[in-house]
Image (cartoon, grey):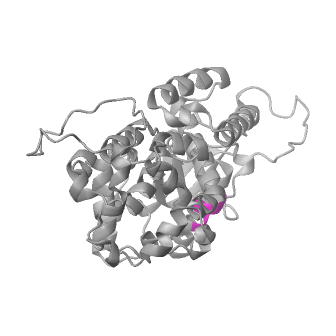
Amino acid sequence: MSCHECSSESYDKAEAWCRETVSAGHGMLFSTELFAAEMTRVSRELGVSVQALNSLFRNAHVTHMKRTSHSVRNQTMRHVKSYLNGTSILKLAKKCNYPPAMMARFIVENVAVLPTRQHPSSTGINTNIKQEQLRGGKNNDAKSTTNNTTKASAGTRKFITQSLRHPEKMLGCASTSILPEYLFSEKVSSNTTDSIPPSLDRNDDLIPLSRLSLEVREAVECDPMYGPRSDKERHNIGIEYELLLEYTLKNMGIPFETEEQLRKRGTAKTPDVLLSCPIGLKVRKKKPPHPIQQSPSRLPGNFEKEDEYEWKIICWIDSKALFGDVDTHTNSVLPQVETYVHRFGPGLVLYWFGHAPLSRLGDSHGDVVVVGGDLPDLFLMPTG
């Protein structure tokens, strides 16, 4: 199998493109069709797989979200006011360079009748203050806004998630799903592009679907990276590659315990796979950032290629169905797997979609081996 290590040049170009595209609020962020087309085009231009580019792009967007989410949330009531006056959820998302599905969640949280607030007086928000904020009065400062989502109950969070999954069913009837003081917004046209037919699981098909349900559906379906569909896809991909790892190890004849088996034994902080005994793997050496020039006659022929590899002992393997970029590896993956090093010894992180140049990825003083694409072909059991 080839080593899915991205070259420094390709990695830098791909990372720069991702950052610039996200910061600019490119139209691909608000259209699943355009997103797929752009990913395919740029993947060919940069020589990076679509899966790797998708993963790298999402990581760049998560970083963008961490920087901007707070300021967007601080303007929640301003966004609600714009929606009530006729601006569509999708247009609000584009204006703020924010994921459409998450903008839809904001609107549902503040406009819909939630399980914990069957009447305006039970929202936990002073109605007079809220109305003043919507009119643009002095209380419009986000610091004076008590957003009920910060203290939302589990039932409320579940309702909002279900509303994004099944907006016609949960939000379809305006009179019962929207707070009374906001019902006027249903008469305001936002020029929602797609007319979505009534859901089959509703008994009141003759009643027109609410504007809120139609716009939530539009926002969710236009979002290429967030929302119930994307969450489910990422979850399924993670499980799929964990099973692939287990299948590969069985075919290689390597005994192991799965994360589920370890948890049944009461083991905390478990990797995806704990090997029943340490094994040796032949992996590519980690090159220094600025390699030293050596004489061409030092190791001729196959011996020079052989010198690019080394044997490493591992006790566990952690599967990552993503591209191992520098930021994610350094700030998320490495701190996680270092706990496995302390408990079980050295191990291996497998980035199925490839990774950044090894010279840029930390290895916990040599105790964490990083590979991409698949497990190395050559391994050595303790018995030889």
For residue 159, above or below residue 306: below
**In screen coordinates, is 138 left or right of 344?**
right
Quarter of the image for residue 69 reads bottom right
Res. 295 visible in picture? yes
Depth check: 344 or 50 in front?
A: 50
For residue 132, above or below residue 25: below
| Residue drawn at (28%, 45%) of the image | 210
| Residue drawn at (86%, 42%) of the image | 291
| Residue 202 position within the rendered picture, expressed as x and y whole percent measured from the top left | 12, 45
For residue 251, above or below residue 105: above
Res. 269 visible in picture? no
The magenta stretch spans residue 332 = yes
**In screen coordinates, is 259 left or right of 360?**
left
SS assignment for the magenta stretch, majority:
helix
Depth check: 219 or 48 in front?
A: 219
| Residue 174 position within the rendered picture, expressed as x and y whole percent measured from the top left | 25, 51
The magenta stretch spans residue 94 = no
For residue 179, above or below residue 12: below
In the image, the segment drawn in magenta is: 330-335
| Residue drawn at (66%, 58%) of the image | 67
Q: Residue furthest left?
A: 203
Depth check: 168 or 102 in front?
A: 168
| Residue 21 position within the rendered picture, expressed as x and y whole percent measured from the top left | 66, 36
| Residue 10 position within the rendered picture, expressed as x and y whole percent measured from the top left | 71, 31
Quarter of the image for residue 237 reads top left
The image shows a total of numbered marks equal to: 0
| Residue drawn at (42%, 68%) of the image | 270
Depth check: 261 or 222 in front?
A: 222
